[in-house]
Amino acid sequence: MAVYDLTLTVLSPLHIGDGGELAQGLDFLVRQGRTYRLNVDAVLAARGAQMRPDRAGNYPLPANLLQPADLDNPAFFRYSLAGIPRSPKADARVKSCIKDVHDCAYIPGSSLKGALRTALAWTGWSEVNPRLDRAAIGRSKSWAGQPLEKKLFGPDPNHDLLRALQISDLSGSRKPGFRLALVNAQVLTQRSAGSPVELEAIAGDTRFSGSLHIDESLFSAAAERELGFANRRRWLDELLPRAQQHAQARIKQLLAWFEQADGYPDVAKFYRQLANASLPPNQALLQLGWGAGWDGKTFWTHLQKDADLFDQLVSDFHMQKAGRGAPLRRRGEPFPRSKRAVMKVLEGRATALAPMGWVLLEIQPS
């Protein structure tokens, strides 16, 4: 078993969701430019006797049970976040970031492995040269492209190349809520922005560590007769150079997109810095979580080589619907049309600052 140490540094706010949403008044309250995550159990234990319905039969929200003096009592709060929701509504919602039972953010190994798998599939495509037609995509949106994945990695989980790659969850500080911020984000087109989205996100310049194992026994002569991995063993030897090749190809396109768009100079500057980065072979840029987009999670340009087939896929899987102010995509038009970005709000005006979820990954022998 080959063992390596992983270090992951967040470069732009990273949101990997846990599937939940936090509601103002129920899960959090806003105070003096910060968002405070309520310890609802502690609030109810101390103030539960006040839980009486009003004339309409509605019970007070946990935040409304607190007195002004309670706001300085850390027992009533799990952690706090820099930033507040843009929405002034009483029931404003925030998408919750994945955290452990101690409210510490972490990077799931499955998320990192998924991003590396995407990079290996994209860079290894020309070596395997799978047949691309409508049948190779399949009819299920949830399982689209599985026949292609099987050609690239193996016919089933037991014979999948990445069975040999094991990645731990990556952990950081053990302080609850450490380096978490409330991020205002939006979906952008080259000419307009969609509705605001509020997220818990890991702030830039935050580091996580974990481990990576490669099961060498799966590449032995005896295993080769059953698994047939040998001709792709180099994919794992070249894991980060291949990931960096994929990242730089995406960065080049994303930089061009934002340079041609109206009003996003800060995002273009961010991508220009990534495009100019010169990294050693044991480092690579990756984009994780909310904001990575379609091109960061699929076979990307390989699917677009056959324009007619790609247009059919967009139509079959309803991948491009008309949005507010945006007409339905026409055949042959660029895809996707939108990107996601972190927004800064000054005097009621939102400005795009950076994309979401870019990280720097480094691998060292353990």
Image: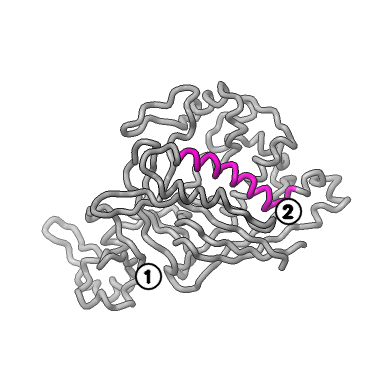
Q: Quadrant of residue 71?
A: bottom left
Residue at 47% x, 68% y: name it: 104
Residue at 88% x, 51% y: name it: 221
Residue at 24% x, 74% y: name it: 47
Which amino acid is tagged 2? Ala
Residue 90 visible (yes or no): yes
Compare residues 46 and 22 and report the one nearer the observer: 22
Decide if residue 253 is on the left or right side of residue 320: right
Instruction: Name above or below for residue 333 compared with residue 85.
Output: above
**Residue 214, horizontal then vertical, whole percent:** 73, 58
The span from disc 1 to disc 2 (Cα, nearest Å) is 38 Å
Q: Is residue 75 magenta?
A: no
The residue carrying mark 1 is 79
Magenta range: 235-258
Q: Is residue 250 magenta?
A: yes
**Residue 351, horizontal then vertical, whole percent:** 33, 49
